[in-house]
């Protein structure tokens, strides 16, 4: 019986893609609604907030969240497809005709490989581009969070010039860190004594200076002073800010190799960028590993009253894999493990476990 490219192979392939598309749309809608609710709660008190802007920001955030969730969408779609085929006796008929589990899993594995490649080259650039656009929209509209998340504290970085040191932070960053919103500049003189604190609505990195707009200046023993524009000398370059402030998950796979090389040239740790790069490269294999995990819990003939146990077993397996992946990723980002090992180890373990269980069930 020829299955590649045969009728049965194509049938299973199309069946899986339709199931995946249904779950994908459902998850996207759930993410959009949850994020819109969170956005409204955080920014509704801001003068520049409208329902349209809130929905637009949530819509732009969806691709990045979906990129994280899509391996588990593949897991749920694989479980659902195999269960549907099982409950309608289609797998029973296929087995009776001499088709092995590996043969009817091949279309699902092929589909997940294609979906993994599409995630890398289509969804990832869309997610990173929309994330950068979110920062620009928030900066242009002047949105301020009334209930910031616990881990949303602005990062601080330090610059040093002949006039003294300056500590800089900002609530909003755009254009690779060269455009800041709600920025704070704490300046010290050459002797290390506090000079003043500048609170600016916007700060733009120009050639050799930060251009601060709509500034409030605070000095010890002096009343606060409002100024339209202040220039703060700097020796920072746009490339250094881009490497220091831009998180790895907001950089597309096409730019990551250059970021890794640039970070190392500036003396900045490149482990986070390398981890993100290898994690993206491993996505097609991770999708296929999800198929094997789904088959591990779904191939046994299931009666109608046993579906919930199968679904919970698959979800538990996916949750364990997610926790292990996050822990190993933390080791990779910290440099404890080589990033390529940290990215591929969960995939290899999941694929090996699924393959071992299927070999035991099919071949004894």
Image (cartoon, helix red, strand yellow):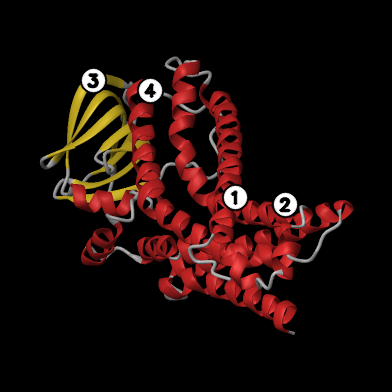
Specify the quadrant that holds the N terminus. bottom right
| Disc nearer the start of the sequence (2/4) | 2
Tell me which corner region of the image, top left, top right, bottom left or bottom right, holds residue 355.
Answer: bottom right
Instruction: Say which residue label 4 marks.
Output: 142
Mark 4 or 1: the one toward you = 1
| Disc nearer the start of the sequence (4/3) | 4
Tell me which corner region of the image, top left, top right, bottom left or bottom right, holds residue 195.
Answer: top left
CB under 8 Å between callouts 2 and 4? no
Instruction: Say which residue label 3 marks.
Output: 227
| Disc nearer the start of the sequence (1/2) | 1
The reply to whether residue 14 is visible in this rendering is: yes
CB under 8 Å between callouts 4 and 1? no
Q: Give the CA separation, mark 1 to mark 2.
A: 10 Å
| Disc nearer the start of the sequence (1/3) | 1
Instruction: Say which residue label 1 marks.
Output: 15
Instruction: Say which residue label 2 marks.
Output: 84
Mark 4 or 3: the one toward you = 4
Q: Give the CA separation, mark 1 to mark 3.
A: 64 Å
CB under 8 Å between callouts 2 and 3? no
Q: Give the CA separation, mark 2 to mark 3.
A: 67 Å
Query: Mark 2: which secondary structure?
Result: helix
Pointer 2 local density, CA inside 10 Å: few below 14, some 14–19, many at least 20: some
Residue 182, given in percent of the width and then of the height, sits at 36, 30
Query: Mark 4: which secondary structure?
Result: loop
**Residue lying at 24% horizontally and 40% vertically, measured from the top left:** 178
Pointer 3 local density, CA inside 10 Å: few below 14, some 14–19, many at least 20: few
The disc at residue 206 is none
CB under 8 Å between callouts 4 and 3? no
Please say if 186 is above or below 286: above
CB under 8 Å between callouts 1 and 2? yes
Q: Give the CA separation, mark 4 to mark 3.
A: 19 Å
């Amino acid at each position: 019986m020829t299955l590649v490219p045969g009728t049965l192979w194509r049938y299973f392939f199309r069946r899986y893609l339709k199931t995946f598309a249904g779950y994908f749309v459902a998850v996207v809608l759930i993410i959009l609604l949850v994020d819109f609710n969170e956005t409204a709660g955080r920014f509704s008190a801001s003068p520049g907030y409208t329902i349209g802007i809130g929905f637009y920001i949530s819509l732009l955030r969806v691709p990045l969240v979906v990129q994280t969730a899509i391996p588990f969408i593949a897991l749920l779609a694989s479980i659902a497809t195999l269960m549907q085929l099982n409950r309608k006796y289609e797998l029973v008929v296929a087995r009776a005709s001499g088709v092995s589990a590996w043969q009817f899993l091949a279309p699902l594995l092929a589909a997940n490989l294609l979906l993994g490649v599409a995630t890398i080259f289509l969804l990832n650039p869309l997610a990173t581009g929309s994330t950068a656009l979110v920062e620009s929209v928030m900066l242009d509209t002047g949105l301020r969070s009334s209930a910031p998340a616990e881990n949303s504290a602005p990062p601080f970085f330090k610059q040093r010039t002949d006039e003294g040191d300056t500590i800089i932070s900002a609530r909003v960053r755009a254009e690779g860190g060269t455009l800041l919103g709600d920025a704070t500049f704490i300046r010290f003189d050459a002797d290390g004594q506090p000079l003043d604190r500048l609170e600016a609505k916007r700060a733009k990195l120009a050639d050799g200076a930060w251009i601060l707009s709509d500034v409030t200046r605070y000095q010890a023993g002096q009343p606060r002073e409002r100024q339209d524009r202040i220039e703060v000398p700097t020796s920072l370059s746009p490339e250094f800010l881009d490497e220091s402030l831009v998180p790895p998950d907001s950089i597309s796979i096409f730019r990551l190799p250059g970021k890794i090389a640039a970070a190392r040239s500036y003396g900045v740790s490149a482990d986070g960028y390398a981890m993100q790069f290898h994690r993206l490269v491993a996505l097609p294999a991770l999708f296929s590993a999800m198929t094997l995990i789904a088959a591990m819990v779904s191939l046994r003939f299931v009666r109608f009253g046993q579906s919930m146990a199968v679904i919970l077993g698959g979800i538990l397996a996916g949750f364990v894999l997610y926790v292990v992946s996050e822990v190993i990723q933390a080791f990779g980002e910290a440099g404890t493990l080589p990033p390529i090992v940290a990215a591929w180890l969960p995939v290899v373990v999941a694929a090996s476990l699924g393959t071992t269980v299927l070999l035991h069930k099919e071949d004894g």
